[in-house]
Image (spheres, rainbow, N blue to C red):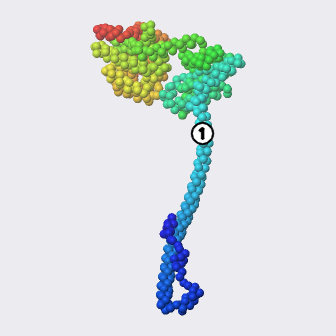
Amino acid sequence: MNKNVPAPRKNISRRPIGANVKVRSATPATMVSLSVAEASVPAGEQAVARSAESVFMRENSADRREEVADRREDAADLREETADLREETADLREEVATLRDKAIRDNEDAAYAKAVLGARTEAQLREANERLLVAMVNAQAMTVTAEQATEKMSYMAEHDFLTGLPNRALLTDRLSQSIAFALRHGKKVALMYLDLDHFKHINDSLGHEVGDQLLQSVAKRLQACVRLYDTVSRQGGDEFVVLLPEVDERQDATLIAQKLIETMAQPHVVRGHSLHVTLSIGISLYPDDGKEVETLVRNADTAMYQAKKNGRNKYQMFTPDMNIRAVARQAVEQALYHALEHREFVLYYQPKVNLETGAITGAEALIRLKRADRRLLPPAKFVGIAEECGLIIPIGRWVMHEACRQTQTWLQAGLDIGQIAVNVSAREFHSNEYIAGVRAILADTGLDPRHLELEVTEGVLMQDTEQTTSILCELKDLGVQIALDDFGTGYSSLSYLRRFPINTLKIDQSFVQDIDGETGEALVSAVIGIGASLKQRVVAEGIETQQQVDFLQSRHCGEGQGYFYGRPVAAEEFAAMLAADACNS
């Protein structure tokens, strides 16, 4: 029996053994006295005495029995108490055993837990150490990578990604240092701004990959021509800058410029193509042409544009009067932006006539820019600037739309204009959305495509001939006419004339005006003969004299235009010319 608390013991009242027993036994002396007394006592008394003794004996016997009973009861109580003690002892032993078993189990569990915890802790420590080691290795690798990335980013921030040359930012820093050094030591600094002539033609005809490799070849040649402490920088596109930090005279810079031009004249072999490129170079000097970085760069750039205007493939030193022209150019550029936004362009129309009858066969639309003083600026003053700053595309789109709109208005009024000719620049013609633009304009104005003639130059045709052929064929499918403007001044061949779907050849006015000269008549006659053999219309431009008219008629030239037949006029005046021509016919 398992008990946590010992069972309560019975309240056993213990008496000393024989405590309830009345001692009535007589001593031997008493017994002898009784026997003597008995012998001397009479019989009746003896009987009473025996009876009393018998009673005494019975009482004594009863007392003994009672004492025995008490002893038995005490024994029973002792046995019961002993049983209780045994039971309590058994319970205590069972409890102790239980506690011992529990303690053993707890010890075993603790030992197991300790073992498991020890193993787990050891594994965790091992894993933590491994992770720490990996983290340290990764941290070191990341540090190295970060340092390399920082170095790479720093290099990329200061160098051109294509050629590896210093970029504009690094050039500016080096130019600043060169100016500070020159100021302390009384030296000069030369800055040369370089631009590749007609580089866009290479990109358009052979692709940008060839163009990029050509730029890399140019960069290497430029570096080979200068001193180790000079800087060759790429500004972007096909523009480079050469910094000469220590020069004594202007001649030092001009000698290097001439060397660069001569070196660049050698062909560049790129992907099997032998490419010839030339340089236009503008030069500015510190402190003669400016004392700040921005001023020197701007003046060198201005001189470079002047070199291009003077024929390209040459260098040009900066002169103060160039800034006046640069300011004027900037003013024209701003005027172009303003004119586009506020619709300040107007179209003038110059008639084309049949040289035999004098009847108007069409007109050429010529753009004019209205100035603030209401004077009109001719296209020769701003078209080149529009091409350089990228405005030629939106301007060309406006010209075509306005010309088609006006032509449709005349036709609806009963004035037969024949065809309206619109000049197209190379950038317009080779833009991605040119054909879509032509379609949209014809759809918007409602003009029949047969009344639209697009004039392109030989230079436009020779850029990417496959793309050119595709565009011309699409235009022909639309019903649009194609005229080759300024024919004879470029480098077209008869094979290209047969290949391209050309409808009209326009004889350049320089040939017409030289009819009275030694070669003019021969060249004009040759162009008229080519047009006749290819079954193409021939239009002579720039006719100003009767002698020129007579010669062209004698050579059976079909049409002509020039001041002899009329200057470009506004739409209202040209409508009057059409009405008068209709009355005379």
Label 1 SS: helix
Residue 223: quadrant of the picture: top right
Q: Which one is in front, 470 or 91?
A: 91
Q: Residue 282, position in %: x, y?
A: 59, 18
Residue at the spot x=53%, y=29% of the render?
Answer: 211
Taking 386 as reference, is 36 above or below it? Answer: below
Looking at the picture, tell me which residue is in the foreground, 83 or 519.
Answer: 83
Q: Is residue 428 left or right of residue 449?
A: right
Residue at (28, 8) in percent of width and height = 583
Q: Judge by depth and name the residue closer to the eye, 252 or 264.
A: 252
The residue shown at (60%, 39%) is 145
- Crowding around mark 1 (Cα neighbors within 10 Å: few <14, some 14 to 19, many 20+) is few
Q: Which residue is mark 1?
A: 145
Q: Amino acid at mark 1?
A: Thr
Asked whether 560 or 104 is in front, the reply is: 104
Rendered image quadrant of residue 271: top right
Quadrant in the picture for the C terminus: top left
Q: Is residue 546 above or below residue 75?
A: above
Q: How many marks?
A: 1
Residue 479 seen from this side: yes
Q: In the image, 346: left or right of 143?
A: left
- The x and y percentages for residue 532 are 39, 20
Residue at 33%, 14% (x, y): give it: 417
